[in-house]
Image: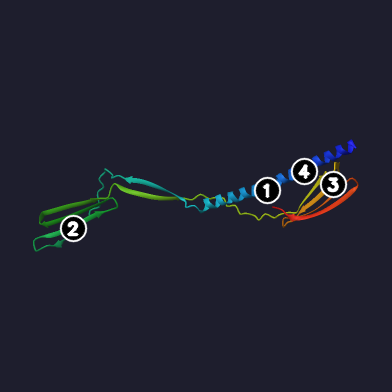
């Protein structure tokens, strides 16, 4: 009797360890699935974010060296029979020079004006776009799972022995059967339920 009881206790311990291992595996799958969904949400939020814009500023300073322009005589505009008016300009992106002369044989009047466009602020806009990995969620396909266990029923001071077999279908329904024997009586129990 003691040897049989030892075997029953060992089998019960094996069944308990197997049940704990399978339960931990299922809990791990559920937690991993929720973390996976959270990670996908985070990556999608990063991918949808507006890219950063970096502003670069620079300043152009005037060149101290004189740069002479190729000479070109402007066309005169007669003011009257004795005077002519000459107008010329030099314009680039940094400086504009305007010259107006009134001449009657000799220079009667000269006006020189200028407009300085420096320091000129130059703005370059660089948009930095980083590629973000995109995870495409694969649908989780549930599998059939089969569980087995051993029972040690107790009734009126007597200890019995039993076996249990359960199957979880792909639709998460539990179908199972239990067989127990106590004091020369045998009991068979069927069960059906939902897995949450």
* Among the two numbered marks 2 and 3 on one chain, the one whose residue lies closer to the N terminus: 2
Q: Are marks 3 and 1 in contact (CB under 8 Å)?
A: no
Q: Secondary structure at mark 3?
A: strand
Q: Nearer the viewer, residue 127 or 33?
A: 33
The quarter in which the N terminus is drawn is top right
**x, y (%) of residue 3?**
89, 36
Q: Secondary structure at mark 1?
A: helix
Q: Which residue is mark 4?
A: 18
* Among the two numbered marks 3 and 1 on one chain, the one whose residue lies closer to the N terminus: 1
Q: Which residue is mark 2?
A: 87
Q: Which residue is mark 1?
A: 29
What number is the disc on residue 43? none
Q: Residue at x 14, y 53 (%)?
A: 110
* Among the two numbered marks 2 and 4 on one chain, the one whose residue lies closer to the N terminus: 4
**x, y (%) of residue 26?**
70, 48
Mark in the foreground, 2 or 4 = 4
Q: CA distance from mark 1 to mark 4?
A: 17 Å
Mark in the foreground, 1 or 4 = 4
* Among the two numbered marks 4 and 3 on one chain, the one whose residue lies closer to the N terminus: 4
Q: Nearer the viewer, residue 160 or 170?
A: 160
Q: CA distance from mark 2 to mark 4?
A: 102 Å
């Amino acid at each position: 009797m003691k040897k049989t009881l030892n075997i029953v206790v060992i089998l019960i311990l094996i069944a308990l360890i197997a049940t704990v291992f399978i339960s931990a595996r299922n809990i791990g799958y559920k937690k991993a699935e929720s973390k996976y969904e959270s990670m996908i949400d985070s990556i999608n939020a990063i991918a949808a974010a507006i890219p950063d814009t970096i502003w670069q500023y620079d300043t152009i300073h005037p060149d101290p060296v004189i740069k002479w322009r190729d000479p070109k005589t402007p066309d005169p505009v007669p003011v009257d029979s004795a005077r002519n008016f000459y107008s010329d300009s030099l314009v680039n992106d940094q400086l504009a020079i305007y010259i107006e002369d009134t001449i009657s044989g000799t220079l009667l009047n000269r006006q020189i004006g200028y407009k300085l466009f420096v320091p000129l602020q130059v703005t370059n806009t660089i948009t930095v776009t980083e590629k973000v990995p995109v995870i495409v969620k694969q649908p989780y396909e549930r599998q059939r799972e089969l569980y087995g266990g051993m029972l040690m029923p107790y009734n009126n001071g007597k200890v019995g022995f039993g076996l249990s077999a359960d199957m979880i279908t792909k639709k998460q329904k539990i179908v199972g059967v239990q067989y127990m024997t106590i004091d020369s009586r045998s009991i068979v129990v069927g069960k059906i339920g939902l897995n949450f």
